[in-house]
Amino acid sequence: MSPDPRATYNQLLEQRQSELTHLQQRHRTLGYAKLATAGLVLLLIWLSLAQGTFTILWVLVPIAVFAVLVVVHGGLLQVIERVKRAESYFENSLKRLDGNWSDSGEPGDRYLDPEHPYAQDLDLFGKSSIFQLLCTARTLMGQDTLAAWLKSPAEAPAVHERQEAVDELRPRVDLREELAVLAEEARTGVDPAGLAAWGEQPVRLREGRFRMQVWIYTVIGLVSFLALWIHLANTSGAIHLEESTGGLVRDVFLVGLLINGWFLYRTRMPVGEVVSAVEEAANELRLLSEVLVRIEREQFRSPMLARLRTSIESAGEPPSQRLGRLKRLVEYLDSRDNVFVRILEPFLLWTPHLALRVEDWRAQSGAAVRRWLHAAGDMEALCSLASHAYEHPGDVFPQFTDQGPSLEALAIGHPLLPEDRVVRNDIQIGGPLRVLVVSGSNMSGKSTMLRTVGVNTVLAQAGSVVRARAMRLSPLQTGASIRVSDSLQGGVSRFYAELLRLRQILNMTGGTLPVLFLVDEFMHGTNSHDRRIGAEALVKGLVERGAVGMVTTHDLALADIAVHLGERAANVHFEDRIDDGSIIFDYRMRPGVVRRSNAIELMRQVGLEV
């Protein structure tokens, strides 16, 4: 028996809240302890000064205690922040179960493209969208990956691999929680495109004679530094050199300092670019490193997850080791702020040596950066689909068939509707039957049915579970004309915009995948005569090009399309009934053509005198 997601989330949320309460108590205790220790230091200083016996040894112990408390407190604050993120993670998870998720999460507006053949029509992105319901990804990489999966149907083998990965991750609430908490740090601090480009930039400093020059000038610097010490020793009387020899030593020091100063000045631009770039990139990789290390520690069964786990290694070396070396290099670069390092720079050429080591790191590991980003993005996208599958145990993975185009679903419903309100219908398109002509009165469920079929088809080919008891389909490319609008700036009417979308769907039939077309209110912007002729011609053209689909209409004359297409089309409808002056909808799809309209009754209900 599958665990109850609500009970699990509530239990884990209570644990995180209890843990947070305990940590905050420790936070207050440490705060008071730091305050008391600081007060003790001040008191000891005051007492010793008042008695005229001040010594630093008296306050060393409380100062050391204060320093330890600062370090411990800093670590505690990081733990508190992560527990708060975990608390927020489960709060958002419960909001999804309660249907209150539309005011939280990532809507993904930036992925909404009006030219996309179905994204806007099927509410894939934006407030209260499919993306907002699914997305638990915290990083830009994860969000980009999930959006790409929704916008482009994957091939059946890739979908099957995603299904296996999602099924393996579905019960792993602990892993999904950890990855979400760790990825929160990289939420806004990582630029995937820029970071990948940094890793793949041509290595410049390692080319030519630069490395040899650095070592030659380092030797010059060491000789100059030795000459400086000899000169200082001679000046202080520690050693005695002849005047000519002392002058020569001084000149060796000055010439060496001048030569190395000139070299540092001449190479400041390329070296500075390498150093500044790695400091920014290393900070972004630091934010991402814990996610990669967490993936590195896992052993997976499903092929996609196992391949993803392997892909983050470079030459058999895990990212934790490679990122550890980069971290140490950046720490060495940060040491340049030390005054002694600055003094020794002309002699040791500290920065050019480190810049070369950074370029060596990029030569060995730079290509892996893009793989790391892809791995993190794929993992977050899979976790998003796994969370959705876990939270909807009644939803199923669809099956794919090579015999198509076809789409069959038993008890299919819209995933954006709460499960206690969704009305399910059966649908079958394929074989001889290629088109369903859906008629029905206003608000009866025609458009929702089109979106239901479209959204579940998109989810199926993204690797997700679908809102159905069973679903079987062939690979399909969806094209929808449901929410087409006019453009005042573009000078495009609603009717013309619909024609452009229909042409786009027609052109899609020349692609590699058969097209699933979903057209709402076919050509309702023109007269009945032209609508009937145009709609029949277009549907016939789509069917002859191997497409399958559904069209809805208020115009019952368009129901004749099914008559002219014979066994390749069928009429279905939604209906309503009047009960005590109120219109009642059951949202059930029935065979045949609807026989009545509710337009007049709706006009009366809103107060129009008709």
Image: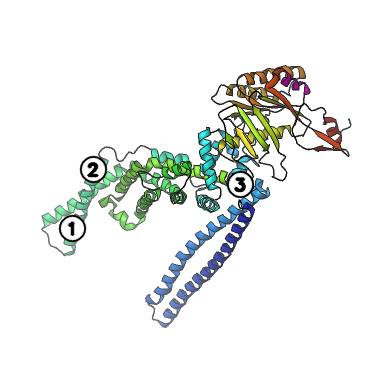
Left or right: where 535 falls relative to 116: right
Question: How far across and down, in percent of the image, does residue 594 sit?
Answer: 79, 28
Identify the amino acid type marked 3: Gly
Question: How far across and down, in percent of the image, does residue 129 sit?
Answer: 64, 40
Pick whichever, 592 or 98, lies toward us. 592
Q: In what element is the residue under mark 3?
A: loop
Pick whichever, 90 or 263, lies toward us. 90
Q: Residues within 10 Å of mark 3 (few under 14, many from 20)?
A: some
Q: Tell me if label 2 and label 3 are in contact, CB under 8 Å.
A: no
Identify the amino acid type marked 1: His
Question: Residues under labels 2 and 3: Cα distance?
Answer: 54 Å
Q: Pointer 2: what residue? A: 212
Range of magenta residues: 551-563
Q: In what element is the residue under mark 2?
A: helix
Query: For the C terminus, which image quadrant?
Result: top right
Question: Residues under labels 1 and 2: Cα distance?
Answer: 29 Å
Determine if residue 169 is in view: yes
Give the answer, above or below, for where 437 lies relative to 23.
Answer: above
The mark found on residue 105 in the picture is: 3
Q: Pointer 1: what residue? A: 231
The mark nearer the N terminus, 1 or 2, is 2
The mark nearer the N terminus, 2 or 3, is 3
Question: Residues under labels 3 and 1: Cα distance?
Answer: 68 Å
Left or right: where 250 falls relative to 72: left
Q: Main secondary structure of the magenta part?
A: helix
Q: Residues within 10 Å of mark 2 (few under 14, many from 20)?
A: few
Question: How far across and down, in percent of the image, does residue 207 sit?
Answer: 29, 38
Q: Residue at x 58, y 22 (%)?
A: 509
The mark nearer the N terminus, 3 or 1, is 3
